């Protein structure tokens, strides 16, 4: 079977030669919608293209005609999933005005929303990040770098423009650190929600979540923040100081 890269090149070549007809584009979109639900419910390995075709009432070969392979189909599903997530600077205006680290705090505080209300695209993102083979993961990484669906580069430039981030560090390094750490920390927060036993060794999760977020932001600030920094707003609207020499503590009210 051809790899995903070969299938993607074929699709690109075909798209240059023949513009997709409206009915064809609508059919592709319908297939992606159904596949997103199917992959989310069954995982990548257990998902069957034949089952998706049967649910849609179309021939299995029709799906392969549009996407080339199961990998090609999942890649399109993954792109739709991550494009549905908000970008960093989609935070409310008052949060943006408060600064770079307040924006991060805002999105970390809303992490569980993804689980409860956007569980399908988030599960697809998890599958793409951790549940696919290296060939598919390579294409996913290329897409993330090329498209920057979360607006990380623009967000880092926002922080640099406000003087909140280090100017002695390469911007691509700051972007990479932010991508790596935010992704893994949000996954950890959601894993704790799915399986609270993982994070209840030293207390109940509701009492620890805010402290963990502030501790994470303090570590990130020490890594990429400018020498002089403003405090980070806590979840209850008060100002919390999180400087390089202060470890955040759980709020008591």
Image (tube, grey):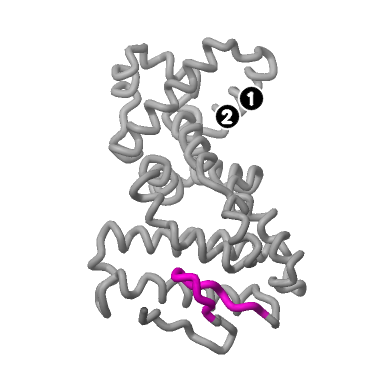
- For label 1, the SS is helix
Q: How many marks?
A: 2
Q: Left of 112 or right of it: where is 134?
A: right
Residue at image position (54%, 61%) is 180
Q: Left of 165 or right of it: where is 81?
A: left
SS assignment for the magenta stretch, majority? loop
Q: Quadrant of the C terminus?
A: bottom left
- Indicate whether 76 appears above or below 207: above
Is residue 47 in sight in this rendering? yes
Q: Position of residue 60 (x, y in %)?
A: 36, 16
Q: Nearer the viewer, residue 228 or 96?
A: 96
Q: For the residue carrying disc 2, how many other residues have a C-alpha within 10 Å: few (<14), some (14-19), or many (20+)?
A: some
Q: Left of 46 or right of it: where is 105?
A: right
Q: Which residues are magenta?
A: 229-240
**Quadrant hosting residue 188:** bottom left
**Quadrant hosting residue 99:** bottom right
- Indicate whether 49 appears above or below 197: above
Residue position for label 2: 8
Q: Which of the numbered marks, if any, corresponds to residue 12?
A: 1
Q: Which of the numbered marks, if any, corresponds to residue 35?
A: none
Residue at image position (29%, 37%) is 41
Is residue 135 in sight in this rendering? no
Q: Left of 216 or right of it: where is 44?
A: left
Q: Nearer the viewer, residue 118 or 173?
A: 118
Residue at image position (37%, 26%) is 34
């Amino acid at each position: 079977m051809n790899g995903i890269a070969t299938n993607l090149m074929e699709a690109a070549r075909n798209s240059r030669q023949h513009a997709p007809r409206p009915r064809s584009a609508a059919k592709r979109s319908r297939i992606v919608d159904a596949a997103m639900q199917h992959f989310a419910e069954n995982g990548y390995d257990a998902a069957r293209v034949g089952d998706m075709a049967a649910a849609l009432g179309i021939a299995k070969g029709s799906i392969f005609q549009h996407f080339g392979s199961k990998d090609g189909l999942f890649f399109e599903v993954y792109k739709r999933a991550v494009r549905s997530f908000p970008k960093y600077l989609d935070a409310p205006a008052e949060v943006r005005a408060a600064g770079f680290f307040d924006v991060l705090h805002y999105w970390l505080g809303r992490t569980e929303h993804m689980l409860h209300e956007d569980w399908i695209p988030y599960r697809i993102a998890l599958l793409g990040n951790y549940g696919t083979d290296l060939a598919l993961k390579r294409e996913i990484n290329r897409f993330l770098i090329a498209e920057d669906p979360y607006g990380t580069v623009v967000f880092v430039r926002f922080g640099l423009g406000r003087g909140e981030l280090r100017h002695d560090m390469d911007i691509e390094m700051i972007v990479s650190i932010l991508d790596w750490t935010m992704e893994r920390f949000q996954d950890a927060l959601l894993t704790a929600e799915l399986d609270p036993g993982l994070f209840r060794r030293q207390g109940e999760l509701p009492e620890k979540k805010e402290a963990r977020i502030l501790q994470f932001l303090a570590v990130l600030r020490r890594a990429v923040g400018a020498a002089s920094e403003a405090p980070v707003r806590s979840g209850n609207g008060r100002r919390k100081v999180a400087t390089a020499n202060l470890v955040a503590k759980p709020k008591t009210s």
